[in-house]
Amino acid sequence: MTYTPDCTLPTDVLDQIAGGGLDALPEAIRLLINAAMLQERQKVLGVGPYERSPERQAHANGFKDKTVQTRMGALTLAVPQVREGGFFPKSFDKGVRSERALKLAIAEMYVQGVSTRKVAAITEELCGFEVSSAQVSRAAAELDSVLDDWRKRPLGTYRYVYLDARYEKVRQAGQVRDAAVLIASGVDATGKRAVLGVSVALSEQEVHWRTFLEGLVERGLRGVELIISDAHGGLQAARKAVFGGTPWQRCQFHLQQNAQAYVPRQEMKREVAAAIRAIFTAPSLHDAKRLLGETVQRYRAGAPRLATWMEENLPEGLMVFAFPEAHWRRLRTTNGLERLNQEVRRRTRVARLFPNEASCLRLVTAVVMEISEDWETDKAYLTFEH
């Protein structure tokens, strides 16, 4: 099917799927990407197709076919050209960035001799060609430049910052080790979210966290009014060193999970969970503290370890009450990062074992970069009243 500028996209896509079912998905996706690229060019030109206007900023110069390999096979896209040069559609690059990172992760495993026959077969299927070390190196260098620029981009004022960590398997010196993947996201003064940074390392946890947080500050992060995170030991030490005067909200979801380890009997778990939930959802800080005191006293005799743990830890989940009530739901937990982590996990599960830290960082960065770009077009995550 030939793509033309006057193509009516929704009808074409629906007709493709209606006629061919799932087999038509590659063609439908090709149409979608082509249309998105065409819209980008129209914005650059400043006028509609064939329109004469003094508002015109540039001139269209046809299309250039470019074939990319995806998990659905090869897609030949019509990349729109601009006569004055310097134009390249972001929708094309964004759509294939994380796919390329995933291919490279698997390809590196194969090239470095740590893959199985199954991985070799997947590599050939995904990449569409025999993988050589030279090809992998060239592709990695090109992609790494883009991802590194994004990780080093300047930041600014972010009022709320969320921090989280997860782990991926990485091979080092013939051993399989757990590499920590650190992610920071933030909400700016307009209420919009962004992924602020990501880091992958096998180093000691506190050192890694401190280096990561110091890097955010060096890139211009400022105006932080609240940090939301779990109580990771290394994270807490680094947070106090870098953001010592900034209020901290301990993730209430993780507090609920942690409490279960101190419940002495299985039949008590639901009751304890409800009691903690009542504290966290109280209408005010005063009510939350009152409920906390009553709950601690209730379990003092029958579950002393639980009572002591509650008294020492639950107050760390009450900082949210010092902020606007309209923001409480968003500030109680780090669940706002959950979709992001789920998407990262979905992609890294395919690779399973990374050949090195750089390969893991490449794929994770590509995924979170795409999600952060999607957040830019979403409606505001929070509303700040002036």
Image (cartoon, rainbow, N blue to C red):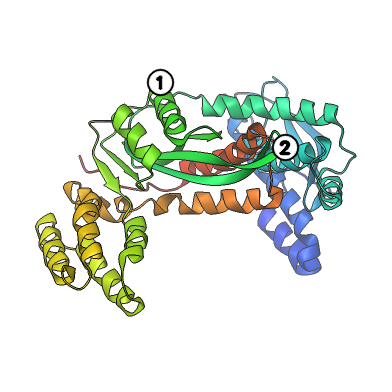
Q: Residue furthest bottom?
A: 267
Q: Is residue 152 left or right of residue 335?
A: right
Residue at horizontal 65%, vertical 43%? 36
Residue marked by disc 2: 174
Give the CA distance from mark 2 to mark 1. 35 Å
Residue at horizontal 37%, vertical 61%? 257
**Please, is residue 309 above or below residue 116 in the view?**
below
In the rendered image, the quadrant that contains the C terminus is top left
Task: Please state the total of marks drawn on the protein image.
Answer: 2
**Please, is residue 347 above or below residue 282 in the view?**
above
Residue 282 quadrant = bottom left
Say what secondary structure mark 1 lies in.
Answer: helix
Observer able to see residue 187? no
What's the residue type where badge 1 is placed? Glu
Residue marked by disc 1: 218
Q: Is residue 105 left or right of residue 160?
A: right
Q: Residue furthest right?
A: 130
What's the residue type where badge 2 is placed? Gly
* Viewer-side residue, 367 vs 302: 302
Where's residue 4, x and y in %?
77, 44
* Viewer-side residue, 42 vs 369: 369
